[in-house]
Image: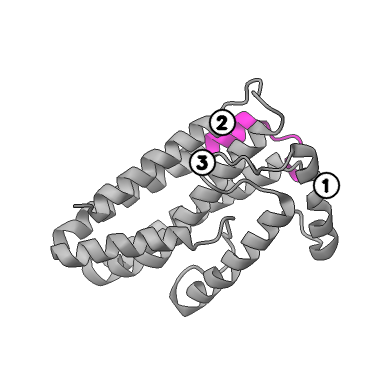
Amino acid sequence: MRTLLSEVEERHAALLKLLQTAAHRGSPAQPGEARMNTDRFLAEASRHTAAATRVLLPSIAKHLPAGRAEVRDHLRAIRRLELMLVKAKAKEYGQAQTVNMPWASVWAGVRTHLARTIAAERRLAAMLAEHLESGDDTRLCERFTRAIATSPSRPHPHLPHTGLPGYCTRVVWAKLDALWDEVEGRVTSAAPSRRAKPAGRRALDTLPRRWQTGTPY
């Protein structure tokens, strides 16, 4: 039987594997492969943090001793990770503010904050398992899995994360992110897709979005 802890640990392992692939900047086997690998990791990491905020944090606040303090600390860690994900996406898409920022520095920051987030989430999930009945743990695991599938595919560190504002924000931005992912030709599934657009086409696709929104990412 799957538990919340086993699901969280499996998701963590998948994220670390995607990060390892994305951070390897060797000679690509095909054009655009580096960008596709980066997009996959960024999308999965963004969905994971959004799902953790939506599903795990309310349960932590409700069931754990000092739960509200744990939520505040973990929310800060999530925002720091999301800020690093924003930098990685800006670097991948050639934004001016990241030109002089080496990839090694970007990935080092991502690794550091992802490791801290993973360690905290595993500890909190293990603590939740001690306070939840078996049926409640299973339902929470199922909610977490569903939340990942429907969460935004881009990091949004400056938007509301908790409560009703956070929920409404995630619903809206999940749809908007999916729209812009299609426009930009981003690869946002963990598995490779044969329908991915060539790198040149994706680069051209970013132009309409920049003209329409006036935003760098």
The residue closer to the viewer here, 80 or 146, is 146
The label number, if any, that marks residue 23 in the structure image? 2
Labels 1 and 3: the sequence-earlier one: 3
Q: Main secondary structure of the magenta part?
A: helix
Q: Secondary structure at mark 3?
A: loop
Tell me if 190 is positioned left or right of 195 in this view.
left
Residue at (56% x, 39% y) in the render: 192
Q: Which residue is mark 1?
A: 204
The 10 Å Cα crowd at callout 1, few under 14, some 14 to 19, many 20 or more, is few
Q: Is residue 30 magenta?
A: no
Q: Residue tagged by mark 3? A: 191
In the image, farthest residue toward the top:
27
Q: Does residue 130 sit above or below 41 in this rendering?
A: below
Rounded to the nearest angstrom, the CA distance separating label 3 from label 2 is: 17 Å
Q: Earlier in the sequence, mark 2 or mark 1?
A: 2
**Whole-number angstrom distance, CA of label 2 to CA of label 1:** 24 Å
How much space separates mark 1 and mark 3, taking CA atoms? Answer: 24 Å
Q: Which mark lies nearer to you, 3 or 2?
A: 3
Q: Secondary structure at mark 1?
A: helix
Label 2 CA crowd tier, 10 Å (few <14, some 14–19, many 20+): some
Which stretch is magenta? 95-109
